Each structure stands twice: as structure tokens, then as C-alpha cells.
Amino acid sequence: MSISLLLLIIAVIGVAGYLFGSWRANALAGGKLSSLHSRPGYYGSFVAIWSVLPALVVMLVWIIASPIYISSTVRGGFPEEVKATSQAEQNLAYNMIGAISRGLNTLSAEEREAMFADSATARTVLAAKGVPLAADPAPYMLTSADDLNRMTKASGTFLSILVIVAALAGAFVSYRAIAPKFRARNRVEGVMLVSLIAASSIAILTTVGIVASMATEAIHFFNMVPAWEFFFGTTWDPRFAAAGATASSGQFGLIPLLAGTLYIGFVAMLVAVPVGLFAAIYMSEYASRTVRSVAKPLLEVLAGIPTIVYGFFALITVGPFLRDISAQLNGLVTGNYASFIQAQSVLTAGIVMGIMLIPYVSSLSDDIITAVPRALRDGSLGLGATRSETIKRVIMPAALPGIVGALLMTASRAIGETMIVVLAAGVAARMQLNPFEPMTTVTVKIVNQLTGDLEFTSPQTLVAFALGITLFVITLCLNIYALYIVRKYREQYE
Amino acid sequence: MNMMSEAAVEKALDRQMNDISYKMIGKDVSVYYGEKRALYDVNLNVRENTVTALIGPSGCGKSTFLRTLNRMNDTIDGCRVTGRITLDSDDIYDPNIDVVELRARVGMVFQKPNPFPKSIYENVAYGPRIHGLAKAKADMDAIVEQSLQKAGLWNEVKDRLHEGGTGLSGGQQQRLCIARAVAVSPEVILMDEPCSALDPIATAKVEELIHELRANFTIVIVTHSMQQAARVSQRTAMFHLGNLVEENDTDKMFTNPDDQRTQDYIMGRFG
């Protein structure tokens, strides 16, 4: 029986359980619902949950466990000389057995006979049925494949019976449990609570999993390259080693990448903070309701543009524009029409990233400014302060901690931003202060190190994980600090 | 202040009341919030150096009227005021009037104490500073001290002027807000239910303060408490459903009102 059919049967049992459960509760109440502890629907849900949940758990466990069991049994049946070979070769043999077993299912009885009589024909026979084999199978493989098929089939039948029995048993037991004083509501809500907790733990566990996987790879890297060379090295020169040649190890200095990241992030904040903040002040304090209702969503559309599009914009519009205008300026001043801003530069990436960040700054700050109690505004205006005096002297000081928190969050976005810098910042890992020259960032180098055909055991690739976890720790710290500040600020008015 | 001079002040005030000099005159004042009309042609005059109490059930328009007197309604989207309100014969809704200057002359104290998240000193100095009332630091110190003294708060806070204003108790915060309003030397002080967030002892202090402030300022107070109106005011105006029902001497209002609705409200039959 297929899994989807089984699921359907479970669902049907669940629905039936719901209907019977609520019907029985109604019957027990005898028209006087107040004699029940919970409303009939809760009794129905209780029965439905007990029909569906245990059956699903049984199914899940079986689906995970049975292939493991079957595989070990089949491998246990291998002849001794195969068992003596390496793990990889055994895996190959097992894979071929799996292919044969799929092919066997398509054969008629006579074809089967013929094939078992002469295992050398197996390859051609199965190929005709659309199941290619890598080599002529050994005779034991045919029997193993047969065993495999038999066990899979038995397992499927057993699963169906087990699941249906579990569903019916659950339904029966819970149906019998229904009594007027039975607290069905509390049970059902308990299940709801558990599922909510499960949902939130998935998000948290995923984070933990990501960190753990990055950390393991990073540890591999640090086994090959000393940590201090990575964190304090000032040269980035990974030297893509040819396959097999381990002699040229390269240098993995984080400092130039970090410098580029921070420099570009700084230029971006230089653009985003004043523009975003002024936009937020206008939106929250001056704009009439109609202007606000139109302009605010428009501004927030900027946040919905994929960053790769900003990357194009930087690459084909802003970069060349800056280069050309610098050539014109240079020409006007010195007569020499050579551009001093390169198309790919810190400035280009910073400006475009700043534009990308404007909606974050403005929308977060707008929320924070709006959260400043109206009473403070009225108090200041009532003393004869103008709007701008009120903003400067009362609202901004009151909102400042929250705004600083918002800016820190924005900064952590700037540091983690990838696509814009990949296209606009360049790939040269250099340490310099001229914003008109290209620099590169941590994220760009992660992309560089991981694209292309590379083996996952060389430091050249593994360095990406070390970079990733460094970036993660930096942005995590920024976010935690930002949350701490924002929370502290909230307490002031509550 | 000794007994004699206090009696003299009372006498002077009584004489002024007999002459009846009006500080603010409202004529046919109507207020609309968008489509909704909140006030219907209110004619109400505010006498100088007098405490005028505005009473009435919730939503009757008394706070709305109060806020028209220093144009605080301007800050509400979709609010429109018609009619004419004068302050010493200046039309305050005249386009040539600077609303900032108006609010310096007509100060306001709000329902909930709303000290700025600054020090006590800075709270009081805020108004004088934006209006440039003090040249040197010594002048500012003097203004702050006088204002706090007028608000009866000086003795309680003189040793911690540079601590946060939000750390004071509710009653102290409200008196700090009054000191803040007094510091810009307004001519009129509007109070919007200044005691509704305070406990009885703090209320008594604020009421006493209102009584003293009357010597220097004209006060208009909105209150939900009839006893408070009776205790602190000399004139009382009763609002109902956006109309001014009756305006009279407080004594008369609470003993023998002209209007049946006033009587019913004061007796607690509605509201």
C-alpha cells in the first residue's frame, strides 16, 4: 500500500474519530451541554488527535527504521569474499543490488527464470527494461536482490497493518475515554501547545545546526591553517592549488577582507543614516496622512528589491557614472581627462548599499519616533516650541537609544550584504584608504572560494567556513547589542 | 505671605471681578474633527485672574474647547475650528498670529504628567531656553528656582535638580509640569484634568497650587470632579453634547443653577 493511500486512510479515521467523538459527547450530555466538562467539539478533536498522531509517529519511525534494517540484513547475506572488501566496494555492490531489485519487478515469470539460470544475461535483459547496470552482476547479487524485494514488500505490508491498527487503537481507546467529567479541552490544548513549541524549536534548532556545521568545517580549516594567521594575517593570497598538489598553501589573512567590509559598510551607513533618518522624521512628524499613506509604502518598496538588482544598478549605472564624472572633474581642474574613481570601487558599492539600506533605517526609525508618547510632543508644543525644536530637543533625545539600536541592526545587514559587493566592490583584497579604489569584503571572498570545481578538503575551500562563522559572530554580536539597547529603551515608557 | 496681604489679594481680585475684565473671549466657536462636529457655536469668556472650571460628562467637548484656546487642536489631523477667539483682543486664529508665540502666552498642563526624559532643571529650563528668556546661566538658575517655588516643588527637589524628572512621584511630576508651564511666564494656563492621574494627597497639593497661581495667572481647568470645580474655581461652565449649557459663578452653579441639565449633572443624575 502506498504511503499516500495510508495517509488518506489515517485522515479518514481521524475525521471519523472526530465525528464519533463529538457525537458520543453529545449523546452523553443528553441535550444538557453544561453537564460536559468541554464542548463536544473538543471531545471530537481529542479522538481525532489520538487516531492520527500515534499512527503518524509509528509510520515515521517505520519509514526511517525499516530501510536500515533491510540494508544490514542484505549486507549480512553477502558472501565472505565480498565482506572482506572495502566499505566503498560493498556500497557499490549494494547499489547494484538495489538496481537489480527494481529491474526484477518489471520482469515476467519466464524472463526471471531465464535470468536466474544465467546471471551473465542479466545486464542486457535489464537494460532492455530501462534499468542500466554498471557491470555484469555476480550470481549472489540476483538472490540478494530477490531477498531485498521480498523484504521491502513485507515491510510495506507490515507498515500498512501497523499504522492502521495504531490509528484504530488510538481512536478506540480515546473514544472509550470520553466521559462527562473527562477534561478533553485541556488535553487538546496541551497538544496545541506542544505543536507550537515544536514549531519554534525548529527555527532555533536550525540556527544551532547551521552554526554547528559551519563550526566543524571551520575547525577543519584551523587544523590546516593556524587561527592567529587567519585572524591577524594581513595578506590574503589563497593560491588555488592544482588538484593533488598540496605544497603551495597560500596565505589566509582576514584583516584586508575585514577592512574592506567595514570600509564599505561605513560608506553605506554614511549614505543611509542621514537620508533614512531625515525621511523617517518627515514621515512621522511632518507628512500629512495622505502623503504618508502613499510615500511610506513607496519607500518600503526599496526594501523589496532583490539585492542582485542593486548590484546591476551599481555595475552598469552608478559605477560608470562615477568614473565618467570623475574624468570630467579631473579634466576641468587639471586638463587631464583620466578618471580617478574606478567603476568598481568602495564608493560605488558603498553608495548603492547605502541606497539599499535607506528603507531599513527609515522604517525602523519611523516606528521608534512614532512610539515616543504623544504626551511629550504635546508638552513641548504646549510650551510654544516649534515642531523642529520639539524634534531636536525632545523627540530625538527620547528616541535616540532606539534609533541607535536600529542603526546597529542596519549595520549588521551592511556587513552581511553579498550581491552588491560581489558586483560593485571588486575582488582585490587590499588594505588602503582611498575610497575610489576597489576593495573586497568577507562575503565576496566566501563566494569566490566556493564557486568553481574545488575539492572540499583543501584550505582554499574550507576558509569560506571560517570566514562565514567570523561574519556570523560579528553580526550576531551587533544584533544582540542592538536588541539589548532597543529593549532597554522600551522599558522607559512602559 | 501673612493674613493681611492675603486678604488684600482676595479683595483686589473681587474688585477685578466686579469690573469684569475678560482675558479671552470665545465667540461662536465650533470645532469639527473631519466630518464630525464636536462643538456647536460656543460663546464663553474667560475672566482675568480667575479660575474657570469646565465641567460636563465625557465627550461633551470641554477638552476640545480648552485646546482651541492655545490652538493645540492644530496638531490633530483633520481638525477644523470656526468662530473667533481673542486673547487681549488679538484674534488667535488670525493667519498673522504666530502659534508659537501664542502658546508661550497661553501655557498648558496635561492630564497625564508628561515630564521630558531630562533632568528636573532641564525640564523647567526647556521653555525659557527655546524662547531665549535667559541670557546668562544665573538668569536661568533664577527662573528655574522661581518657577519651582511657584509650583511648590522647590523644597522637595532643590537638592536633586540634575536628576531625571521622570524619577519623581506622579504628583511631583505634575507640579514639575506646572513649573515648566509657569517658567515661560504665560498669561493664561490651561489645565486638562491635571489631577485625574494623581492620588488624593497629590491632588490636594495641586489644587492648593492652582489657588495660589490665580494671583498671577488666568487659569482655565477641565475637571471631571465636581468637588474639585467647586473647590478651585470662581466661574464654572457646563458643557453637554458639544454645547455650552450654562456659565455662571461657581457658588451659584452648585447651589442654584439656571439650567435643569446642570442641576441634573451636578446631582449625579447623568454623566
Image (cartoon, coloured by chain):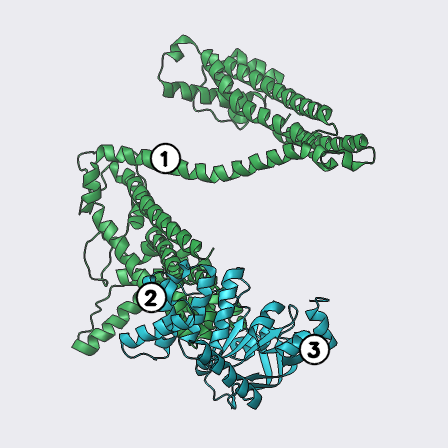
Chain colours: A green, B cyan
Q: Is residue A404 above or below residue A223?
A: below
Tag 2 residue: A318
Label 3 marks a residue whose chain is B
User: Mark 3 packing: few (<14 Cα in 10 Å), some, or many (20+)?
Assistant: some
Tag 3 residue: B257
Q: Who's the residue at 21% across and 50% down the image?
A: A256
Tag 1 residue: A212
Q: Mark 2 touching mark 3, by CB under 8 A?
A: no
Do the dots labelled 2 and 1 sit on one chain? yes
Q: Earlier in the sequence, mark 2 or mark 1?
A: 1
Do the dots labelled 3 and 1 sit on one chain? no
User: Mark 2 packing: few (<14 Cα in 10 Å), some, or many (20+)?
Assistant: many
Looking at the rendered structure, the number of numbered marks drawn on it comes to 3
Q: Amino acid at mark 2?
A: Val
Q: Residue B251: x, y in percent?
A: 63, 77
Q: Amino acid at mark 1?
A: Ala
Q: Is residue B242 visible?
A: no
Q: Nearer the viewer, residue A100 or B116?
A: B116
Viewed as shown, does residue A244 lie left or right of A203?
A: left
Label 2 marks a residue whose chain is A
Q: Secondary structure at mark 2?
A: helix
Q: Amino acid at mark 3?
A: Pro
Q: Nearer the viewer, residue A486 or B22?
A: B22
